Amino acid sequence: MQKRYRVTLTNEEVQTLNALLSKGKHSAQKRNRAQALLLTNQGWTDSKIAEAVGITGRAVETIRQRFVEDGFDVVLAGKPRGHRERALDGRAEAHLVALACSGKPAGHNRWTIRLLRDHLVADLELEGLSHETVRQTLKKMNLSLGNA
């Protein structure tokens, strides 16, 4: 089967990988990626690389793909994990606390998580705010909507 992603390392990249493998403390994942890249560059098959390095054949494919698409540094360091932006900033959290500590809303016996969410969305023009975010924020601040 024809390989879709071909790895061709420069002399500098080969030296970097050899240095990484020969000295210093590095994670097993980083060492495995370095070994797989070196063996791929030498023309080994994915199954032989997987067996020699101790990873799966799919992992070898992924390493080759990342090298071609994202570059040398991304393969070694790993793909950055996506972190979501906070749904509530400090101002919104303060507004939530003020709402939760205020008197009961008109027409209701007490505040509920969903009522708080609805008021936050309306007051601060937030989009896509879930009631779970409101619950977690209240929990983080040690606030309870129980009977007071």
Image: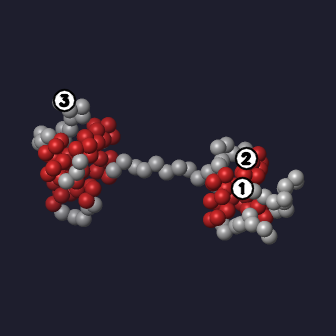
Answer whether residue 17 is visible to the viewer in this image. no
**Quadrant (top left/top right/bottom left/bottom right) for the N terminus:** top left
The colour style of the image is: secondary structure
Q: In this view, does 87 lie above or below 9?
A: below
* Residue 9: image location, x then y, percent: 19, 41
The secondary structure type at the circle numbered 1 is helix
Q: Is disc 2 surrounded by few (<14), some (14 to 19) or many (20+) residues within 10 Å?
A: some
Q: What residue type is labelled 3?
A: Gln
Asked if the residue at tag 1 contacts the one at tag 3, i.e. Cβ–Cβ closer than 8 Å, the answer is: no
Where is residue 21 drawn, in percent x and y?
Answer: 18, 58
CA neighbours of label 3 inside 10 A, class few (<14), some (14 to 19), many (20+): few
Say which residue appears at 75% left-offset and 56% top-offset. Answer: 112
Q: Name the residue under label 3.
A: 2
Q: Tell me which amino acid carries mark 1.
A: Ile
What residue is disc 2 on? 121
Question: Against 66, is 35 above or below?
Answer: below
Q: What amino acid does circle 2 point to?
A: Val
